[in-house]
Image (spheres, rainbow, N blue to C red):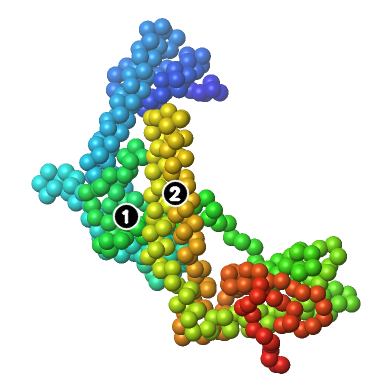
Amino acid sequence: MEAGNLDIIYLWETTRGSRKAGDWIDFIDLCRDREVLIHVTNHGRTYDMTIRRDRKTLVEEGIDAEDDSEKIHDNVVRALRANREAGLPHGICNYGYQRIHHPQSGALLGQERDGHAPVCAEIITRSAAGEAVSVTTADLNRRGIPGPGGGIWYRRQVFRIATNVAYIGKVRVDGELIDARWPPVSDDPEFEDVFWAAQHLLTSPGRKTTRPGRSKYLLSYLMTCDECGSATEADTPRKRMVTSKYRCSGSGHCVSVVMEDADAFIVLAVRKKLSEPDFYKHLVSGSDKRIVRARAEAARLRAELDEWATADISARAFSLREAKLLPLIEAAEKRAEELTVPIPLRELATPGADIQARWDAMPVAARRDVIRLLFPDLRLLPGKAPAYQRIVHGTAGLPEQVPAQG
């Protein structure tokens, strides 16, 4: 039409042109400028936009179309809000549930769990235990469990399930959580605490959402120089140097140690520590249930703070509420962090586990996490003595010596 190649445009009705009054008026003005006729089949007539009355008629039609669209929108929103306030489901049925309708009228009565509900409960439970979303996703696909829509699983689907309050039988209305007319995906009385623990882990501001770089050296930047306090870095072979070392990263390079010897000594120290009879009992003495409760408390308090942020209250009232809730949130998060045991360390320390086999199967990044937790204060002393005489960890925790062949 802008090129002047049209003489007439046919529409079934004016709403087919646009439901936005501004767009519609621009359109009919272009028709007037190009002298293009508009035939509306539903009206049974043809309009000429160069005629004032014809233009006025179609302008009014466009305004009415926009108003009708707004009425439909308001009615839909009102119905959805009524459903939410009544605890009824709305929108697409969540994975793990199926809708219930009245057998005669077909009216929506609610929804109930289907055969996929246990999968949803498993996803939430594994997320609460600190398992990465990518690991859960890969495992579901490996087991051949159909995802939402019947296809494979994607990380975003697992994340949505693990953070959706619908799976604990709740619905959110204007920031407020109310009980819904459907059951949670698990009958476990503590399942809601498990859900909030998963919510805390997956939505925590400190959560890592990017894949870390590949770690290559076991002890680089985990030890510090006892002389100057600088971290030790990996010093790999160059022209006349044939042995890899860990050395002080400070300007003076105060200390260094053969990398192979230091690695062997630390691995022996890890095995010795994990082989202690009471180590696993001491490791998990915090109790998973206490961790879950602490995470759940932090998540609930943070959700309450978010609701206050959107409430119709003064800035002063919100600041007072925030000042009260933030210390409680921080205390709960700190308590959960102190009780939590990283999964790699828990697996290594499990009674009866083949420590060496599991250690060999772990990526370097996971091994470093274990070392960091077991020996948080590794220091390298100056001198030329063997590694086992120069690497210290506070006052205890390392073996006295490395076997001759070790």
Residue at screen point 37% across, 51% down? 164
Residue at screen point 81% across, 72% down? 255
Task: Find disc 2 in the rendering and name its residue.
Answer: 328
Where residue 310 appears, as percent x and y from the top left, is 41, 35
Vertical order, 277 against 95 (above or below): below
- Inter-mark Cα distance, 1 to 2: 26 Å
What SS does tag 1 mark? helix
**Disc number placed over residue 337 in the picture, else none:** none
Work out which quarter of the rendered image holds the C terminus and state it.
bottom right
Vertical order, 5 against 126 (above or below): above
Task: Find disc 1 in the rendering and name its residue.
Answer: 167
Where residue 114 appears, as percent x and y from the top left, is 25, 60
What SS does tag 2 mark? helix
The mark closer to the camera, 1 or 2, is 2
Vertical order, 403 against 190 (above or below): below
Neighbourhood count class around disc 1 (C-alpha, 10 Å): few under 14, some 14–19, many 20 upward: many
Residue at screen point 47% across, 47% down? 327
Q: Nearer the viewer, residue 135 or 39?
A: 135
Is 153 on the left or on the right of 208, as rendered? left
Dividing the picture into quadrants, the one containing residue 129 is bottom left
Is 295 on the left or on the right of 241, as rendered? left
Residue that extends furthest to the left in the rendered view of this protein: 104
Asked if residue 224 shows in the view, the reply is: yes
Residue that extends furthest to the front in the rendered view of this protein: 395
Which label's residue is closer to the chain start, 1 or 2? 1
Residue type for callout 1:
Tyr
Neighbourhood count class around disc 2 (C-alpha, 10 Å): few under 14, some 14–19, many 20 upward: some
Where residue 126 appears, as percent x and y from the top left, is 41, 65
Asked if residue 65 shows in the view, the reply is: no
Residue type for callout 2:
Leu
Where residue 25 appears, as percent x and y from the top left, is 44, 17
Q: Nearer the viewer, residue 115 or 381?
A: 381
